[in-house]
Image (cartoon, coloured by chain):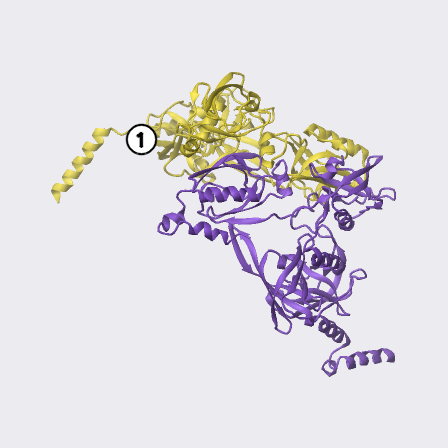
Chain colours: A purple, B yellow
C-alpha cells in the first residue's frame, strides 16, 4: 500500500507541479499526449471531386503525423488522394505545403513530404499493433471537424475487427478494406480525425484513425500501425503498391463445417478470364495452401491475411495452390497479374457537360462486357449537351461514330476530335444494363453558344484543357 | 345596351342551331342510369398484401364497384384489385340495390394482359339470369363529347348507384387510341360503365396506360381514361380461366428493343426521313435473333404494313402491331441494313412469361419464397443466358434464411449441393435437405455480378412443416 503511494508520488513529481493536483491516470494521459502532439499535423488538402457531371475542387480537413525529421507525414488516402494542393499546419501553428509521396487506396494509407529544407521536425514514435489488448487505454489526436490539436481518450474495444460482411460480393468495390483487420476504439473519432494517430499510454502510435460507424456512438476504427508501416515503407520507395491478383473472392469456412480435418478457405467467386479461372479453379473449391503456406480461415477475421498473402505474391510469378474439390485435392499453378484499382480515372468533358471514368474490371463484369472496353458515364449536368442527348450516369459508351472505344484515352481522343471539328451529329453506341441503344449527340445548339454568340469560339475548348490532369 | 344584349342572345341561339353539337340530355342520363344500375354490383373482398422485403403480410377488407357483363355472372372490376403482391380472397358480389340485394360468392379470373381490369365470375349452384351491361365496340368519341359514367356511392349511402357527366378532354393516338376525361371521377366510379350521347355503353373508366412489352406492367396516368370496348371485348367473348390455372393469353413477341428513326438519325445515316424502328437490342434466342435480325437494322415494314416511327411514343404502335399478329404465321419484315433493303421472314413466338406471372414456391422450412428466372428479370438484372437458378422474391423475417442474411433479389444457383435450374429443382432440393437434416446448408448464389455462399444453420428440432 505504502509502496503504491510512493509510485503515484513519483509520477506526480516527474510530471511537474502542474499535475500535482491531477490523478495518476491524468498524468499518464498527458505524458502520452505530449510525446505525440508536437508531431501532429492538421492537413488541409484541396481535392478533386466529381459530382453531377462536373469536376470540382473542394478543401477538406484531416489529420496526420510526422514520422521522420525531414518531414515525412503519414495520413489517410481518403484525405490526401486526388489532391491538387496540400496545406499542413503543425502543432506550433507553423504552416508548410506538402507533396504527395504516395497513396494506397486499398489500405487507405497516404504519405506526404513537407516542403521545407529542415531536418529537425518533431517526430512520433511508432509502436507496434501486435501486442494490443482490448481494454487498454488509447488516445486519438487530430482535427475533428477541423478543430485542430484535439485529443480524445478511450479504450481499445476490439483489436481485430473485420470490416465488411462475409456476404458474397462484400470484398468488391472501393469501400472494401480487404487486406487488414482494424483496431476498434471508443475514443471519439469524427470526420477530420482521419489520418491522425491512435496512441497508447507510452506515447507510441499504434494505429491511424480512419473510419467511424455512422449513426453509432464511439465506434471508431484505426488501421493497425504494423499494417501501415509496411505500406508506408513501400510508398516512400515506389509511390504506390503493386499487388498480385489471381481473380478469386474468399469466404470463411463457417462454423459447422469446421471440424479439425476441414481446413482452408472457401473460394466464393472466380472472376471470368482471370488467372484462377484459366487455371480451372471454380467457386466452391477450398483453397488449402499457397506455395505450401496453409490458408485457413475459420472465421471472417482470417480472410484479410489470406488476401494479403495472395496480393504479396510477386507479380508474374507462378504460385502453387493446393485446392480441394470434394474429396479430391489438386495442386494448381496460377500466375499472378497486377491487381487494378477499384476506382478508375475520371475526367470532366465540359463541352458536353458530363464526366466519364475508366471501365474498371468490376464495372465491366457488372455490365457483362467482354473485358475492359468503353468508358463509364459518372454524371451529366442538367441542361448539358450530354443530358439533352439523354446520356445518364451509368451509361457505358462503346463506340463513337462507329469506332470502338477501348479506353478512356481513346475516348478522349475521339471526343476532342469531334468537339474541335464541331461535327453537328455524333453517334454513340451506348450500353446500360442488358440494353444497348444508339444515342445521337447534337453539338450545334449548345446553350453557351446560344447565349454568348460573340464569344471567341476557341475559348471553350481551351478552357477545357485546364481541367485535365 | 339593350340592343347588344338582344344581339348576343340571337347569336347564341343561331350558333347552337348551326353546329347541332350532341349534348347529353337529361333523358339519356336517366335512361342510362335506369338500364345500367341493376348491372352495377358491389364486390366485398379481403386481400393479403405482402411486403417483399420481409415477407410480412397484412390482411385487409375492401369494397369495390363491379359491373356485371354477362347474364351468367361475369364481372368486370378495377385492375388494381389484383397485383404482384396483392392477393384477393373471400370474394362476395352483392347484386341488386336497396331491399333486393343478393350476395353471391365469386372467383377471380386471370388478369387480362392488354388492359388493367380485373375479371371475376360469380359462382352459383343454380343457373343465373343476371342483369348485365351490353357493350358497343368501335365507337369513336370526339373531343368535347359528353359522356355519362355510372358508379356507386360509398358505404354511408348503401352503395347506391349514381351517375356523373364528364367530357372527353383529349384523345391520344398512340400507343393506341386513348380517351382522357376532362375531370376526375369519384372513387366508386373507377371501372364504371361509360355511356355516350346515343346511350351506347362504349367502355369503362380506368387509370392506366398499358406499356409496350411489359405484359401486365402499367403506367399510372393519374387521370381517368375510357377503356374502350375493343380493349377487353375478346375477354368478354372468351373469358379467361380461373386465376392460377396455367397461363393467360400471351401476346406475340418478336424479341427486339427498338428506338424510332428520328429525322436526325436518318440524316446521320443518310436515309430518307420516313421513320422506322431502329433495332437497338436483339434478345438472345428470340424470334428476331433466329430470323437473323441484327442490331442496327431499321425495320421499315412489318407484315406488309409500313413502320414509320419517328418519336418515342411511335415505338408503342410498332409493339402493338407485333402483339396483334398471330404467333404461328410467317411474317415478312422489311429492314434496311447498311442502307440496303432486305427482307427477313420471322415466325413470332408467344411472349415469354413475365415475373408477375412467374411460378413461385414458398419454402416454409427456410423462409424463402423463390421465383423462376423470367426473361424480363434477366434483362433487368443483365443476367447472361448461361446463368440458371431461381430468384429470391421474399425472405420471411426471423427465418433461417433471414438469419443467413439472404435477401430479395439473390439468385440461388445451388442449394445444399443440389444444382437449381427451376422451381421444381428448388422444391426437391429443400425436401432432400430437410430429410437429411445437415447442420449447415450451403446456398451458392449470385449477388449482382459475383457469386458466393450463404450458410443456413437450421435448428432442425425447431423446424415446423
Q: Taking A415 as reference, is B396 left or right? A: right
The residue at the point 74 percent across, 74 percent down is A31
User: Would you say residue B69 is visible in this rendering?
Assistant: no
Quarter holding the N terminus of chain B is top left
Q: Secondary structure at mark 1?
A: loop
- Residue at the spot of label 1: B24
Residue B2 or residue A82, whichever sits in front: A82
Q: Residue B367 is drawn in which quadrant?
A: top right
Q: Is residue A354 visible?
A: yes
Residue A344 x/y as whole percent: 61, 47
Please, which residue is most extreme toward the front here? A117
Q: Residue at x 59, y 58 (%)?
A: A83
Apparent side of residue B386 relative to residue B218 in the rendered image (left or right) = right
Could you tell me which residue is drawn at 76 percent across and 56 percent down?
Answer: A160
What quarter of the picture does the C terminus of chain B occupy?
top right
Residue B27 percent location from the top left of the image: 31, 29
Amino acid at each position: 500500500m505504502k509502496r503504491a503511494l510512493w509510485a503515484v508520488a513519483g509520477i506526480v513529481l516527474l510530471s511537474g507541479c502542474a499535475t500535482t493536483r491531477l490523478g495518476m491516470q491524468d498524468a499518464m494521459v498527458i505524458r502520452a499526449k505530449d510525446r505525440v502532439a508536437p508531431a501532429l499535423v492538421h492537413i488541409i488538402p484541396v481535392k478533386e471531386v466529381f459530382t453531377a457531371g462536373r469536376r470540382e475542387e473542394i478543401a477538406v480537413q484531416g489529420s496526420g503525423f510526422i514520422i521522420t525529421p525531414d518531414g515525412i507525414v503519414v495520413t489517410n488516402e481518403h484525405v490526401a488522394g486526388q489532391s491538387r494542393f496540400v496545406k499542413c499546419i503543425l502543432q506550433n501553428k507553423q504552416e508548410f505545403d506538402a507533396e504527395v509521396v504516395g497513396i494506397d487506396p486499398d489500405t487507405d494509407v497516404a504519405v506526404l513530404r513537407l516542403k521545407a529544407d529542415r531536418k529537425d521536425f518533431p517526430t512520433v514514435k511508432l509502436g507496434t499493433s501486435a501486442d494490443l489488448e482490448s481494454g487498454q487505454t488509447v488516445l486519438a489526436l487530430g482535427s475533428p471537424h477541423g478543430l485542430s490539436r484535439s485529443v480524445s481518450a478511450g479504450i481499445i474495444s476490439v483489436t481485430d475487427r473485420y470490416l465488411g460482411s462475409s456476404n458474397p460480393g462484400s470484398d468488391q468495390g472501393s469501400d472494401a478494406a480487404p487486406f487488414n483487420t482494424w483496431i476498434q476504439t471508443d475514443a471519439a473519432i469524427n470526420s477530420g480525425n482521419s489520418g491522425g494517430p491512435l496512441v497508447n499510454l507510452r506515447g507510441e502510435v499504434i494505429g491511424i484513425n480512419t473510419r467511424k460507424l455512422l449513426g453509432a456512438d464511439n465506434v471508431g476504427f484505426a488501421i493497425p500501425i504494423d499494417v501501415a508501416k509496411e505500406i508506408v515503407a513501400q510508398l516512400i520507395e515506389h509511390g504506390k503498391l503493386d499487388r498480385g491478383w489471381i481473380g478469386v473472392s474468399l469466404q470463411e469456412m463457417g462454423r459447422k463445417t469446421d471440424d479439425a480435418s476441414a481446413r482452408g478457405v472457401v473460394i466464393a467467386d472466380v472472376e471470368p478470364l482471370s488467372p484462377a479461372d484459366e487455371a480451372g479453379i471454380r467457386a466452391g473449391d477450398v483453397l488449402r495452401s499457397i506455395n505450401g503456406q496453409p490458408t485457413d480461415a475459420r472465421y471472417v477475421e482470417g480472410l484479410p491475411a489470406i488476401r494479403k498473402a495472395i496480393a504479396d505474391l510477386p507479380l508474374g510469378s507462378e504460385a502453387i495452390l493446393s485446392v480441394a474439390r470434394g474429396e479430391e485435392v489438386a495442386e494448381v499453378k496460377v500466375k499472378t497479374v497486377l491487381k487494378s484499382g477499384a476506382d478508375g480515372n475520371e475526367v470532366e468533358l465540359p463541352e458536353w457537360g458530363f464526366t466519364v471514368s475508366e471501365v474498371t474490371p468490376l464495372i465491366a463484369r457488372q455490365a457483362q462486357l467482354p473485358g475492359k472496353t468503353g468508358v463509364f458515364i459518372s454524371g451529366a449536368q442538367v441542361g448539358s449537351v450530354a443530358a439533352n442527348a439523354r446520356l445518364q450516369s451509368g451509361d457505358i459508351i462503346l463506340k463513337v461514330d462507329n469506332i470502338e472505344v477501348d479506353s478512356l484515352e481513346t475516348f478522349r481522343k475521339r471526343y476532342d476530335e469531334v468537339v474541335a471539328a464541331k461535327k453537328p451529329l455524333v453517334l454513340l453506341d451506348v450500353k446500360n444494363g442488358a440494353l444497348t441503344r444508339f444515342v445521337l449527340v447534337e453539338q450545334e445548339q449548345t446553350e453557351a453558344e446560344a447565349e454568348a454568340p460573340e464569344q471567341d469560339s476557341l475559348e471553350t475548348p481551351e478552357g477545357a484543357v485546364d481541367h485535365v490532369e | 345596351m339593350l340592343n347588344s344584349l338582344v344581339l348576343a342572345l340571337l347569336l347564341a341561339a343561331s350558333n347552337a342551331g348551326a353546329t347541332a353539337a350532341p349534348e347529353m340530355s337529361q333523358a339519356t342520363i336517366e335512361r342510362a342510369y335506369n338500364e345500367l344500375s341493376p348491372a352495377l354490383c358491389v364486390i366485398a373482398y379481403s386481400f393479403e398484401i405482402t411486403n417483399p422485403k420481409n415477407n410480412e403480410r397484412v390482411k385487409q377488407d375492401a369494397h369495390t364497384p363491379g359491373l356485371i357483363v354477362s347474364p351468367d355472372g361475369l364481372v368486370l372490376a378495377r385492375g388494381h384489385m389484383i397485383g404482384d403482391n396483392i392477393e384477393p380472397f373471400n370474394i362476395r358480389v352483392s347484386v341488386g340495390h336497396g331491399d333486393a340485394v343478393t350476395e353471391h360468392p365469386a372467383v377471380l379470373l386471370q388478369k387480362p394482359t392488354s388492359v388493367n381490369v380485373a375479371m371475376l365470375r360469380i359462382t352459383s349452384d343454380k343457373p343465373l339470369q343476371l342483369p348485365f351491361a351490353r357493350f358497343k365496340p368501335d365507337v369513336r368519341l370526339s373531343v368535347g363529347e359528353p359522356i355519362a359514367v355510372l358508379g356507386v356511392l360509398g358505404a354511408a349511402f348503401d352503395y347506391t348507384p349514381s351517375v356523373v357527366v364528364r367530357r372527353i378532354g383529349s384523345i391520344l393516338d398512340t400507343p393506341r387510341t386513348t380517351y382522357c376525361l376532362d375531370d376526375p371521377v369519384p372513387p366508386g366510379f373507377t371501372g364504371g360503365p361509360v355511356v355516350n350521347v346515343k346511350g351506347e355503353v362504349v367502355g369503362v373508366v380506368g387509370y392506366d396506360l398499358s406499356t409496350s412489352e411489359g405484359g401486365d406492367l402499367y403506367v399510372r396516368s393519374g387521370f381517368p381514361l375510357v377503356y374502350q370496348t375493343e380493349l377487353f371485348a375478346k375477354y368478354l367473348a372468351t373469358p379467361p380461366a380461373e386465376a392460377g390455372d396455367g397461363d393467360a393469353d400471351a401476346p406475340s413477341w418478336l424479341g427486339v428493343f427498338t428506338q424510332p428513326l428520328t429525322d436526325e438519325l436518318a440524316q446521320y445515316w443518310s436515309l430518307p426521313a420516313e421513320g422506322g424502328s431502329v433495332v437497338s437490342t436483339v434478345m438472345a434466342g428470340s424470334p428476331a435473333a433466329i430470323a437473323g435480325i441484327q442490331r442496327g437494322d431499321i425495320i421499315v415494314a412489318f407484315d406488309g404494313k409500313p413502320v414509320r416511327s419517328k418519336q418515342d411514343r411511335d415505338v408503342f404502335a410498332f409493339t402493338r402491331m407485333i402483339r396483334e399478329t398471330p404467333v404461328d404465321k410467317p411474317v415478312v419484315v422489311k429492314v434496311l441494313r447498311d442502307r440496303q433493303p432486305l427482307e427477313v421472314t420471322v415466325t413470332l413466338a408467344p411472349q415469354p412469361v413475365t415475373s408477375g406471372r412467374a411460378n413461385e414456391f414458398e419454402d416454409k422450412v427456410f423462409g424463402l419464397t423463390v421465383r423462376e428466372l423470367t426473361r424480363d428479370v434477366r434483362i433487368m438484372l443483365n443476367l447472361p443466358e448461361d446463368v440458371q437458378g431461381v430468384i429470391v422474391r421474399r425472405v420471411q423475417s426471423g427465418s433461417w434464411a433471414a438469419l443467413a442474411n439472404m435477401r430479395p433479389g439473390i439468385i440461388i444457383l445451388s442449394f445444399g449441393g443440389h444444382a437449381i435450374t427451376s422451381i421444381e429443382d428448388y422444391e426437391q432440393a429443400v425436401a432432400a435437405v430437410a430429410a437429411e437434416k445437415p447442420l449447415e446448408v450451403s446456398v451458392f448464389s449470385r449477388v449482382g455480378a459475383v457469386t458466393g455462399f450463404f450458410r443456413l444453420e437450421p435448428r432442425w428440432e425447431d423446424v415446423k412443416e
